Amino acid sequence: MKICDAHCHLANLAEIMPLPALLEEAAERGITHFLSSALRKSDLSYYKELTDDTQNKVLYSAGIHPFFEACDLEYADLEELCQRNLIWAIGEIGLDRGNPEYAVMEDIFVRQLDLAMDYRLPVVLHIVGYQQQAFDILRSYPIKYLIHGYAGSLQAFNTFTRLDSYFTISERILKEDKHDLLKAMLKSKRFLFESDITQYYVKEGEANPLLRVKAVLEEVAELYRIDPTALISIQAANYQALTGNAL
Ligand SMILES: [Zn+2]
């Protein structure tokens, strides 16, 4: 049974932890596939140097994030990655209410969606606030979307399901007050699981944060008395729909 971490930042984590050993341990526990995100120029060399000699399969996306100060990728970087067929998706990109310059943020968001259209790539979305604005923009593109870490309102979730969209289940919606949203995501069958791990989120004394995605999956299985293998096979089908590859 293969598990995928559908949103993480491996290059970012690799700056402070020994990734090859952590990936090997993750593979032993069944976590074999990663959809990782590049947001800094320095992330790119990590992914370009990754070889397939591990048991892990790491695909990466790249994008200009709406609200992450260290993000220094430029549009030209993304164009080059697309031209060289190196990324599986554009992202994470989107709208974030923390960014005070809405017009600039929307402009770069739209340019990146246009780029994804040109190269027929899926888009990994980060939407915090501005849900209606995001929907109004996204609905005009026939793109597959992976809405990562969504923890907004149930109403906006229902609106986003009208797009060709998939969602990641994160720790954020395991809390009691998000159970309606979690239930709706499970019912939609359009879910994958994520850790969103970066070096900033590693807990003190945590030996291998790559194992977290399995903990999220197991917690959901326990919470709703669902057989974990059923969750894993839905995730596998969604992984294939998004990336075109089997898990
Ligand atoms: Zn992220």
Image: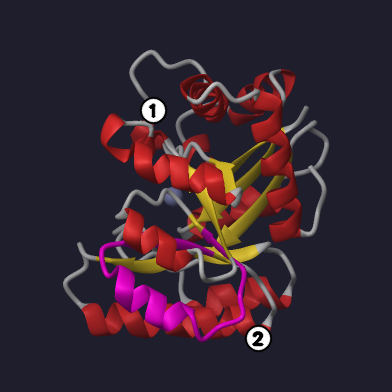
What is the number of the mark on residue 169?
none
Camera-side residue of 238 and 205: 238
Q: Is residue 97 above or below residue 183?
A: below
Residue located at (55% from left, 21% from top): 225
Q: Which residue lies under the disc numbered 2?
A: 118
Q: Residues within 10 Å of mark 1 (few under 14, many from 20)?
A: some
> Does residue 7 appear in this view?
no
Q: In this picture, which residue range is highlighted in magenta?
A: 124-146
The answer to whether residue 117 is seen in the rendering is: yes
Q: Are marks 2 and 1 in contact (CB under 8 Å)?
A: no
Q: Is residue 199 left or right of residue 247?
A: left
Nearer the observer, 224 or 65: 224
Assign the C terminus to one quadrant of the image. Answer: top right
Q: Is residue 141 above or below residue 50?
A: below
Question: Horizontal and vertical percent for residue 141?
Answer: 55, 83
- Secondary structure category for the residue under label 1: loop
Residue 213 image position (x, y, % from top left): 54, 30
Left or right? Give the position of 175 relative to 49.
left
Q: Which residue is mark 1?
A: 202
Q: How many marks?
A: 2
Mark before the other along the chain sequence, 2 or 1: 2
- Tell me if residue 30 comes above or below residue 50 in the rendering: above
Give yes or no for residue 167 being in the magenta stretch: no
Residues packed near mark 2 inside 10 Å, few (<14), some (14 to 19) or many (20 plus): few
Label 2 amino acid? Asp
Residue 161 is left or right of residue 32, and the answer is: left
- Give the structural element (helix, strand or loop) at label 2: helix
Q: Indicate the quadrant where residue 71 lies.
A: bottom left
